[in-house]
Image (spheres, coloured by chain):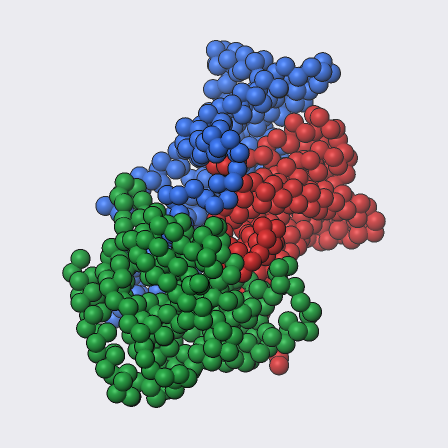
Amino acid sequence: MRRRFDPIVLWQMAVGVLLLGGWELVGLGPGGVWTSRPSLIAAKLAEWLQGSIYINIATTLTEVVTGLLLGSAAGVLAGLLLGRAPIAAGILRPIVVAFYSVPLVALAPLFIMFFGLDMLPKIVLTTIVVFFLLFFNTFAGATSVDADLIAQVELMGSTRIETFRKVVTPACMVWIIGGIKTALPYALVAATTGEMLAARRGLGFLLSDAASQFDMTSLYSALFILMLLGLLVGETANWTERHLLRWRHAEG
Amino acid sequence: MSGTRDLTSPSPRGRGLGGAGFAVPDFQAFLSTPLGRSLARLLLALVLLAVWQYQPSDKLRFWMSGPIQIVARLWTWLLDGSLWGNVGSTLLAMSLGYVIGTSIGIALGLLFGLMPRLHRVLSPYITALYAMPKIALAPLFVIVLGIGIESKVALVAITVFFLVLNSTLDGVRNVDRDLVRALSVMGATHSEVIRKVLIPATLPWIFTGMRIAVRYAFTNTLLAELIASNSGIGFMIEYYSGVFDATGTYAAILVLVIMSVGLTELLTQIEARMSRGSAG
Amino acid sequence: MPKVELSAVSKAFVTRDREVQALQPTDLAVEPQEFVALVGPSGCGKSTILNLIAGLLQPTGGTVRYNGAAVQGVNRAVGYMTQKDTLLPWRTAADNIRIALELKCRAGPRAEVEHRVAQMIDLVGLNGFEKHFPTELSGGMRKRVALARTLIYEPETLLMDEPFGALDAQLKLLMLDQLQTLTRQRRMTVLFVTHDLGEAITLADRVVVFSARPGRIRTIRTVELPRPRDVFRIRFTEAFAHLHESLWDELKDEVTRGTDV
């Protein structure tokens, strides 16, 4: 079944052409020093695609993905365990809530001071940022599992572990997925910030390097790639939610 | 079943613990009271601080500093006034950026809401810009606006703008068309419909967006200060860590934590007051 | 020995500073394979009794005995179908029905499990909806899933709290019929809470009428109608009408008393 061609797409393309055209014109004039122009940017991107860009993309992606995996695993585990230990939960909850709101990304310089220039400080930063997000979300989920669901499964004869596996963990999934959705863009921000502060490689490094040399064309090119990466991250977040939480979107 | 989990009698599982039958169950019960919890937290904090201060390795001392030194440094800052300038700079940048971003976000959101076709045409570009990590724009702003407060404000403004724009659009999309029609049928003019239906109905969404935006404004102010600024708390963190002054770094982070917790408290109070006001 | 025995069982709830007496000291004995219906106005403690037997609540006074032993903790010998359906929202209908058979205490060969699940789905008339999630099902359908998942592991005692309240009249009769067949076949003991006196008389061996809050037993009446009963036609018999009338008089008093309060 073919979708009907939506005329709005034509307008969107027209706007795009207008924007690019206008940019090109401005770029050819005196302001071009600040704005560069699409043709130059495209050329620079093409040049990068010949080879030098891949290591930078890989660096940033590695930092993001590693931090995401480590932070999520630790955060979910801690959240589940602590969430079901009511005494510990009661004691720790206000502390966790208070610290949840501190912008941990601002600690980037601290880790750079500890760990130097390479990927490690960014990975540590990303891991910690993701950890707290996921810990808090999972914790909230684990402490709010419907007691009736648990009682029902216990009546059927489930052991504690079975209750945990079959009820508590799936019930928390909504919260966990919510945490991952929030964490993904934050992980990218953390990695990029770290790279802009001090790095030898990475997209953030490309960006600040270009800025320090007043190379506007490279700057915009790097921004463009970061934008694409941001879109990729966002789509991954959405896909994860749609796929893992199918039962939520099912409507009667 | 629901809602009637037993509060009065001890849990069947709990009855088995503590063979002697006096110390353990009572201890557990005590920890569930507000007083018990506060004491536990206090104890936890004291233990952690003690370990931090008196940990034996001298090598670690350089990197870890200690609570006493950190507080002492903070005290010095308070006395010589250097702290307030930076705190003020952060707060100022955050507030200006917030106000600017919110105003433009609401205005454009309402505009797009009233002209949905315009919105649809522009929406892929908005989405693309929204996806970019805003902090990446910081170097650009520094080049164009310099290293002062303007670039910070610009970054915060753009971040807040996108958030509030999204929320406002959500709100406009959710306005009940029937309400609009009802008023139009009564004979209301276009601007009357906007004033009497559209804006009030969208307000809850706008407020939600504004609430979320405060956090992001704070975070991005700090990020901007890290990357390119010569004042502010973020700048302080960056500066002291740059010269490997661990005590200074931690002291600045402490200020950050205090500001953050204070901000959260303030927001909670404002929200409580507002919801009381609207309920009354 | 009675399957379930309540001896001077009372229950009070403490909320904030108020103490609410849900159940006054009550005695009740349910014999094995007996079908007992509990009727009464809202808030009279019927659900509380079920919770006590299931071990989800502890009595404030008296003892609850199951198979002669005092109930300590969760009572795994009973199946409990609650008023609010507690289906796991992330599992399909079939997966929800299957869950009791997945547990270690009841592990069985996969093929057999699937067979029984299919049987159950057929029994409650949900063919074609096995792969639907609870949010995709109507209230009545969710109840049927809850029924299936409780019956599938054939607990020796069944506790049911207004299980068919949300169903339309025709479906209700069908379900009542199925319930009668199954519980007699598997020799289950049943405690059945309902607002519907007709339902109670149709299925039960004895009907227990509760008073308004604070609840206590007002009357216990044996239902002398012969078994097996034709669920669809029994309400048109004279014996049914007599019983219904006399029980309704008792019940009516309590219901009006309840609403005055």
Residue at (62% x, 59% y) in the render: C105
| Vertical arrangement, residue A84 with respect to residue A110, above or below | below
Q: Is residue B214 left or right of residue B52?
A: left
Choose top left, top right, bottom left or bottom right for residue C172.
bottom left
Expressed as whole percent of the image width and height from the top left, the position of residue C49 reads 36, 58
| Vertical arrangement, residue A113 with respect to residue B9, above or below | above
Q: Is residue A203 left or right of residue C66?
A: right
- Which residue is at the far left? C260
Write down the colour of chain A. Answer: red
Residue at (36% x, 75% y) in the render: C204
Can residue A192 be seen from the camera position used here? no
Can residue C158 be seen from the camera position used here? yes
In this view, the residue in front, C246 or A200, is C246
Image quadrant containing the C terminus of chain B: top left
In this view, the residue in front, A93 or C110, is C110
Count of numbered circles on the image: 0
Write down the colour of chain C. Answer: green
- Which residue is at the far front? C1
Expressed as whole percent of the image width and height from the top left, the position of residue C68 reads 46, 57
Choose top left, top right, bottom left or bottom right for residue B250.
top right
Residue at (39% x, 33% y) in the render: B266
Expressed as whole percent of the image width and height from the top left, the position of residue C65 reads 43, 56
Choose top left, top right, bottom left or bottom right for residue C203.
bottom left
Q: Is residue A124 left or right of residue A101?
A: right
| Vertical arrangement, residue B2 with respect to residue A129, above or below | below
In this view, the residue in front, C10 or A153, is C10
| Vertical arrangement, residue A172 with respect to residue B184, above or below | above
Image quadrant containing the N terminus of chain B: bottom left
Expressed as whole percent of the image width and height from the top left, the position of residue B126 reads 55, 55
Residue at (68% x, 70% y) in the render: C110
| Chain letter for the blue part | B
